[in-house]
Image (tube, rainbow, N blue to C red):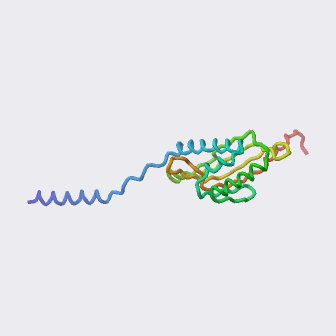
Amino acid sequence: MRYAVAGVVLGAVLIGACAQQTPAPPPKPDEGAIRAALEGRLTKIAEVLSKKDASAITSLFTDDAVWILPDASTFKGKDAIQKGAVDFFTSFDSVSNMSQGIDKIVVVSDSEAVAFTIGKYTIYMKGKKGEAHINPYVDHWKKGSDGTWRIAYEVNSEGPANPPPPAPTGKKS
């Protein structure tokens, strides 16, 4: 009888211990893979800008995306974004020397991330000389059901790059 009671007690303890275990947390999203995917999308952004392809720009955004340009012009939804792109692209002749790189990434989940990116390029406004620009911008990215990362919200803050300070002359005042 003693062994039967001990078996019941031991069984109850084991069942209780198993029931109280917290489930293992889900695996963390692979930041490296997400960064690589977003960098690939940055390449697409550069292509669209260099080609001034307003029709292709909407493929970079979610259906309900928000795109905010440096002058605070705000476009909501793909139709408005395409119209904004047409206006923006007609305001300059060309862009060259473009480079972009993610400075910091915050991975929210395997299908959502925020990237802080620095873009550098030379822009040739209508009838003017080229001007070096720096564009620190932030994108809220979402991965669609088709596996493609698209921008849900973008804020740009570009402007002319400050010229480097003059070289020291070695003279003391």
Q: Is residue 37 left or right of residue 75?
A: left
> What is the quadrant of residue 153 in the picture?
bottom right
Relative depth, front residue between 136 and 97: 97
The quarter holding residue 51 reads: top right
- Residue lying furthest left: 1
Percent coordinates x, y for residue 168 in the rendering: 85, 40
Q: How many marks?
A: 0
Query: On screen, 134 above or below 71?
Result: above
Q: Work out which quarter of the rendered image holds the C terminus and state it.
A: top right
Asked whether 155 or 162 is in front, the reply is 155
Q: Viewer-proximal residue, 44 or 138?
A: 44
Closest to the observer, 146 or 171: 146
Percent position (x, y) of residue 16?
A: 26, 60
Image quarter (top left, top right, bottom left or bottom right) of the N terminus: bottom left
* Coordinates of residue 137 in the picture (x, y in percent): 67, 51
Q: Residue at x 11, y 58 (%)?
A: 4
| Horizontal relation, residue 25 to residue 104: left or right | left
Q: Position of residue 91 (x, y in %)?
A: 79, 50
Name which residue lies at 62% across and 52% down. Answer: 139
Q: Residue at x 67, y 53 (%)?
A: 82
